[in-house]
Image (cartoon, rainbow, N blue to C red):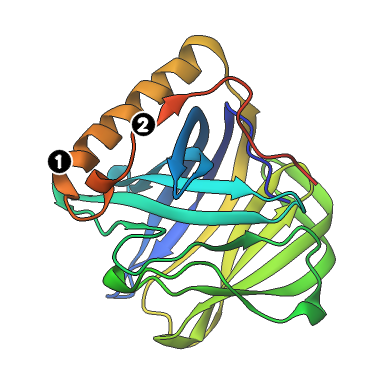
Amino acid sequence: WLPMRPGMRWTYEGASQEEDGKAVPHRLVTTITDLVKTLSGVKTVVSYTLDYSDGELVEAELAFFAQDNDGNVWHFGEYPEEYDKGKFVKAPAWIHGLDGAHFGLAMPADPRPEAGDFSEGWGPAVNWNDRGIVYQINRKLAVPAGTYNDVLVIKESAVEERDAEQLKYYAPAVGNLATGWLGSDAKITEDLSLVKFERITGEELRKVRRQALQLEADAYKRSKTVYAKTSRSTVSIGAGLSSK
């Protein structure tokens, strides 16, 4: 449900609603790098995401994932940098083991509705406390990238927005297909659909690696109490998380 092999890239397009109710074009590009980062003794896969709002880069993010022997995928933290008109604004990072943060479950190996909800991570310093629950299974979903069967839907929520739940749709061997919303309390929402799923290699993958390492270099300077306390990411041939 959440495969992560070096070079896998997902491109999403849609719209986001801002606090003033205005809907703006939204584009998200996530690539799995060929980097690994050891956190609390665990080798994690490094993803690199670029987030565009109305054509402007508003966030770049590194995130870290690991898979246990049973197939569960765990989220070990993230380092996002937020920008406004090209200028750095803030970097609300959370990393397992630092500032009270703890890893969470990104995807159960055998997701079932009756299993109950689960923590997707705990980052108290930056108010990260999302929880997920299996909402639907065996769905069919058409997105610009294709039509998929056996789709899994995870419903996510945060404590401070109890009537604002995000829906994420997943297909086996592909991963996240789309996002949507339920509830009436959401002030900021996003509706995104997968428009392209690909596997990049060679120089294109090396370019993403350089971009990710540059973001990490900035993280060591800007996140003194969190990221600066971690070991540096390294290149690893064969890194990745398996599919279903």
**What's the CA distance linking mark 2 and mark 1?**
15 Å
Q: Secondary structure at mark 1?
A: helix
Residue at point 23% right, 45% down? 228
Q: Position of residue 54 (x, y in %)?
A: 32, 49
Q: Secondary structure at mark 2?
A: helix
Q: Count residues near mark 1 (Cα–Cα under 10 Å), then give few for <14, some for 14-19, many for 20+.
A: few
Q: Reply above or below: 31 against 90.
A: above
Res. 196 image quadrant: top right
Numbered circle sitting on residue 221: 1
User: Which-is-in-front pick, marks 2 and 1?
Assistant: 1
Q: Position of residue 146 (x, y in %)?
A: 75, 42
Numbered circle sitting on residue 145: none
Kindly identify the amino acid type of the residue bearing the numbered disc 1. Answer: Lys
On screen, residue 244 versus residue 106, left or right, reads: right
Res. 243 image quadrant: top right
Q: Position of residue 22 (x, y in %)?
A: 33, 68
Kindly identify the amino acid type of the residue bearing the numbered disc 2. Answer: Ala
Q: Reply above or below: 213 against 90.
A: above
Residue at point 64% right, 29% down? 198
Judging by the rendered image, the residue that carries numbered circle 2 is 212
